[in-house]
Amino acid sequence: QVQLVESGGGLVQAGGSLRLSCAASRSIRIYVMGWYRRAPGKERELVARITQSSDTNYAGSVKGRFTISRDNAKNTVYLQMSNLKPEDTAVYYCNADLYPDKYWGQGTQVTVSS
């Protein structure tokens, strides 16, 4: 079992930046870590993920604006979000994935005003 706690969400104006953090209750070294989001009325979607060797991939809508990183020593994953847009408004969830197990945090709200 891994408990994940997200933080860093909030209200920001379009063009602004936020950094989300996801703190895990145990070592994340063996997990693929990801950030997902769910906007009102939409399905949850992958935003970014980072493998155990720190390879990354991003949704097309955030590529070039968001950066995912991990600090295994601190059991923490980050999502640096820049040039935020109103369409980035969503609840952002942290995920730890090691097949067949998936763990989720409770989510943190990000609201981008125009």
Image (cartoon, grey):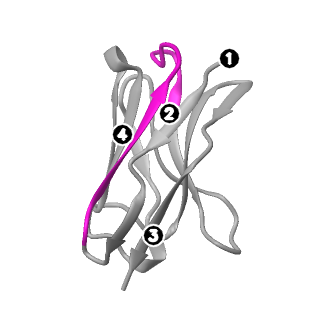
* Foreground tag (3 vs 4): 3
The residue wearing badge 1 is 1
Q: What residue is shown at x 68% (from left), y 71% (from top)? A: 42
**Which residue type carries mark 2?**
Met
Mark 4 sits on what residue?
78
In magenta stretch: residue 28: yes
Quarter of the image where one finds residue 113: bottom left
Q: Which sits in the foreground, 30 or 112? A: 112
Residue at point 66%, 31% (across, down): 103
Q: Are marks 1 and 4 in contact (CB under 8 Å)?
A: no
- Could you say whether the residue bearing mark 4 is in a helix, strand or loop? strand
Q: Are marks 2 and 3 in contact (CB under 8 Å)?
A: no
Q: Earlier in the sequence, mark 1 or mark 2?
A: 1
- In the displayed structure, 53 sits above or below 78; it is above
The residue that mark 3 highlights is 111
Q: Which residue position holds label 2? A: 33
Q: Counting residues from the N terminus, which is met first, the one under dot 2 or under dot 3? A: 2
Under mark 4, the amino acid is: Tyr
Height in image: 89 above or below 67? Answer: below
How crowded is the residue under tag 4: few (<14 C-alpha within 10 Å), some, or many (20+)? Answer: many
Q: Of callouts 1 and 4, which one flags the residue occurring earlier in the amino acid sequence?
A: 1
The residue range painted magenta reads 16-32
| Secondary structure beneath label 3 | strand
The answer to which of marks 3 and 4 sits earlier in the sequence is 4
Residue 22's quadrant in the figure? top left
Identified by mark 3, the residue type is Thr
Residue 79 point in image, percent of width and height? 36, 46
Question: Of the residues shown, which amino acid type is indicated by label 1?
Answer: Gln
